[in-house]
């Protein structure tokens, strides 16, 4: 007889038995041993029908092709710009991938991007040696001006964004801020200073309580109290 040994959104540790029986299927973060499904990481249980998977609660960002991230310029070279990516591996944006402008040899590249600038860029290649190439050409890819930056656990990015963008949209609407969430766990927020602070607090609340049921209602209640505004939202993820 098949049986779940844990509940949805429960936190488990490596080696913990999650289910017994062949009716359940192992997915990310789990494996089968005999007729049992076992956890191989610290994570949050997510059950989809008969599929049992884990959402990691820790871990560093690993660059992947097609990821859109927020990074900071840390060096200006002859051939382009080196970007800090919130992980062990920096990335390069070449001259051809930075702008459609013609850049003459010896031109001052800091007029485009200077050390300390924050940018939204897309990863276009990751080699086996973890050399990362990015582009600034594409919708929404650009240098960020003003605002503030905060960092979250990269595994919590989907929870901060919410289903179909519902969670981050609620924060944007209630605080009247612009928010970009990079897949590398770097978040950019721009608005009135007080509202930026409230948005950061809401994002940190989601990061710290991502395993709590009814989180959307808790965040909504926090935002209404902090901003003094009643939030009227369409259907959003609970």
Image (cartoon, rainbow, N blue to C red):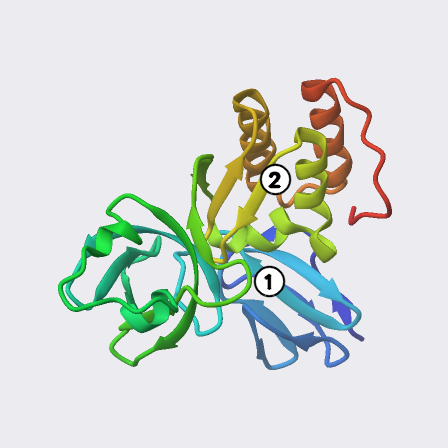
Mark 2 or mark 1, whichever is nearer to me:
2
Instruction: Give the quadrant of the N terminus.
Output: bottom right
Q: Of residues 120 and 206, which is closer to you in this image?
A: 120
Q: Residue at x 75, y 24 (%)?
A: 224
Q: Estimate how packed mark 2 is, as few (under 14), some (14 to 19) or many (20 or more) residues with alpha carbons within 10 Å.
A: many
Percent x, y of residue 82: 24, 59
Alpha-carbon span between mark 2 and mark 1 = 18 Å
Work out whether residue 10 can be spotted: no
Q: Is residue 110 left or right of residue 192?
A: left
Q: Is residue 178 left or right of residue 134?
A: right
Per the rendering, the mark at residue 206 is: 2
Per the rendering, the mark at residue 54 is: 1
Marks 2 and 1 in Cβ contact (< 8 Å): no
Q: Residue at x 55, y 56 (%)?
A: 43
- Relative to 41, residue 166 above or below: above
Percent x, y of residue 26: 64, 75
SS category of the residue bearing label 1: strand
N-term mark: 2 or 1: 1
SS category of the residue bearing label 2: helix
Q: Estimate how packed mark 1 is, as few (under 14), some (14 to 19) or many (20 or more) residues with alpha carbons within 10 Å.
A: many
Percent x, y of residue 142: 45, 55
Q: Of residues 131 and 109, which is closer to you in this image?
A: 109
Q: Is residue 79 left or right of residue 203?
A: left
Q: Of residues 199 and 92, which is closer to you in this image?
A: 92
Work out whether residue 231 can be spotted: yes
- Relative to 199, residue 17 above or below: below
């Amino acid at each position: 007889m098949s049986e779940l040994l844990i509940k949805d959104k429960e936190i488990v540790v490596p080696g913990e038995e999650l289910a017994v029986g062949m009716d359940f299927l192992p997915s990310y973060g789990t494996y089968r041993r005999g007729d049992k499904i076992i956890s191989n990481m610290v994570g949050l249980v997510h059950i989809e029908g008969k599929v049992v998977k884990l959402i990691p609660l820790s871990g560093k960002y690993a660059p992947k092709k097609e990821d859109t991230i927020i990074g900071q310029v840390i060096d200006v070279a002859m051939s382009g710009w080196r970007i800090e990516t919130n992980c062990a591996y920096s990335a390069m944006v070449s001259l051809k991938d930075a702008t459609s402008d013609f850049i003459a040899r010896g031109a001052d590249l800091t007029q485009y991007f200077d050390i300390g600038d924050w940018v939204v860029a897309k990863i276009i290649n990751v080699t086996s040696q973890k050399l990362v190439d990015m582009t600034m050409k594409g919708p929404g890819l650009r240098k960020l001006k003003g605002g503030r930056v905060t960092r979250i656990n990269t595994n919590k990015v989907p929870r901060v964004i919410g289903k179909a963008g519902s969670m981050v949209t609620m924060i944007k609407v209630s605080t009247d801020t612009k928010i970009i969430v990079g897949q590398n766990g770097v978040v950019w927020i721009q608005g009135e200073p007080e509202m930026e602070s409230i948005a950061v607090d809401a994002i940190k609340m989601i990061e710290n309580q991502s395993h709590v049921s009814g989180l959307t209602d808790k965040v909504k209640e926090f935002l209404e109290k902090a901003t003094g505004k009643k939030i009227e939202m369409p259907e959003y993820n609970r």
